[in-house]
Image (cartoon, rainbow, N blue to C red):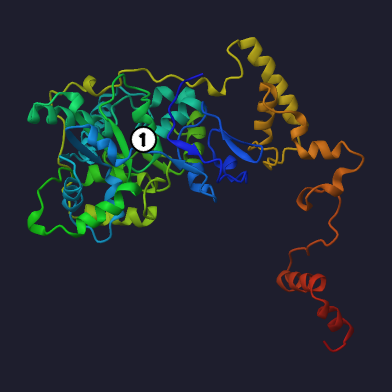
Amino acid sequence: MENVFHSVRLDDEKCKGCTNCIKRCPTQAIRVRGKKAYIISDRCIDCGECIRVCPHNAKYAVSESFNELLKYSYRIALPAPSLYGQFNNLDNVDYVLNGLKKMGFDDVVEVSKGAEFISDATRKMIEAGVLKTPVISSACPAVLRLIRTRFPNLIGNILPLFTPLDFTAKLARERAMQETGLPSEKIGIFFITPCPAKRTEIKTPLCFEDQNIDGAIAIKDIYPVLVQTMDKLQPEELEPLNDSGIIGVGWASSGGEAAGLLKERYLAADGIENITKVLEELEDEKLNDLDFIELNCCTGGCVGGVLTVENPYVAKARIQRLRKFMPVSCNSLPKDFDLDELSWTKELLPSPAMKLADNVLKAMRLMTELKAIEASLPGLDCGICGAPSCHALADDIVRGYAERSDCVFSALRKASDGDEWLPAPFRERAAVHPFPEKGDGYAHDFAHTFLKHTDPKDENKEKGEPT
C-alpha cells in the first residue's frame, strides 16, 4: 500500500452516514459503515467532490495556516490565476498582487507566468512530434491520480512536463536566492490554492523528486483578509507586478490551457463525471483525431475548486472580462532552451489500489468470483449497503470487507415474502395506486387521480354532494 498524504478529511462528528458522497466519488473510495463515511486512502485522489456534495459539511480540506509563514525569513506568494475571478469589478491584477505583499509576503510571482512558459513548451513539443497524441494535460493533479488509478493504459498520453505551479515555484526560488543571498531553507514559497488536490501534490509529488513549494493556503482562507487589504490600496501605491497575459490567466477556467496552444484540434472538459466519460472514450480509441485534451476535475476549471469563494460561472465571466485588458502573452522560452529541463524527474506509475491481487492467477480467480457475486445481486446500485454500486459491494465481498447479507434486498427476499418490507420503488408487485398512463389528457388525469386518493372532498364532488 502507498503512503499518501491526503488533504481531504472527514469530520466523524458531523457525518450522518447519508451516502450522498459515495455515488459521486470517481474512484469509489468512500463507504458508509456504522452510520459514518469511511474514505479508502489508497483510492482517494483528493478531487474534493465529496466536499462539494456533502450536505452536512462533514468533508473538509486542510491547508497551511498563516503561522507557517513565520518559519521563513523571506516569504513568496504564488497566486493561482483563479484567484483573480473572486473579486468583483477587478480590472487590474496589480491590486491583488500588491494586496498580497501588504499582507506580509515579500514577493509575489504569478502562476499564470509559469503557465505561459508551459504553453510555449507544449506547442514546441507537439510541433516536433515527440509526444503521443492525443496529449493529455498534466496540470490537474486530481486528473493524474484518476488516470493512474482507473485508466493506467493512458499514462503514456500524459504531457510529461512541469505544471505551471512547479515551474513558477522553481523560477521564484532561484530569483529570491539570487536577489537576497539567502539559502533555500530560509525562503518559504506558498501557493494560493483553489483545490485540495494541489496541496496533496505539494506534499506527495507524483512526478518529481524535489518540491520547491513549502505549503498551500486556501483561497477561501486568504480572501477575507486580502479583500480588505485591497480596498485600502490607492492607485499611486501600486507596484507594477503583473507579468502575464491572456494565455496565462486563461488557465484559470476550462479551455484556457488548450486555447493557449493555438491549435484547433483540441477538447476541453470539466467536472468529474464529464472527464471520466472522456477518459473512457479515449481508452476505447474514439478520440484519436485530437492533438490535445484538457481535463479539469472541478466544474468550470480551477475557478470551480472547492476552496474558492465565488460561483464558478461568475468567476469565469470575470476572468474573461479581465483578459480583455491584457496582452496575449508576456512570457516565452528562449529559442535555445533545453525542454528536458522542464521534464518530469520521476516516472508516473499505475496505482495498485484497484488490483484484486498481485498474483495474476489469484486475481483472475477473484475476478470470476466477483462477477458471480455481482450477477446474484439485484443491480439496483442503491447504495443502502454502504457501497456506491452492486459491483463495488461484490468487490468488497471478495476482498473480505463485506458480506452478501449486506445487501438488504437479497436478505429480505430470502425470507418467506420480504417484498412487503421493501421500499415502494423496489417492490415487484403492482402498485396499489398506479399512476395514469401518459396521454393527451395526462395532466388532467394525473391531477384528478392524485386528488381522488388524497382529498376526501373530491369523493363528495363525484357523488354530487356539497363540500
Residue 440 percent coordinates (x, y): 72, 70
Say whether residue 386 is left or right of residue 117: right
Q: Image quadrant of residue 23?
A: top right
Q: Is residue 121 above or below residue 464?
A: above
Residue 213 percent coordinates (x, y): 27, 30
Residue sitting at x 35%, y 38%: 265
Q: Image quadrant of residue 40?
A: top right
Say if residue 93 shows up in the picture.
yes
Q: Is residue 450 above or below residue 170?
A: below
Badge 1, how many Cα within 10 Å: few under 14, some, many 20+? many
Q: Image quadrant of residue 338?
A: top left
Residue sitting at x 47%, y 39%: 275
Q: What residue type is labelled 1?
A: Lys
Say if residue 274 shows up in the picture.
no
The C terminus: image quadrant: bottom right
Residue 283 percent coordinates (x, y): 50, 29
Residue 57 percent coordinates (x, y): 51, 48
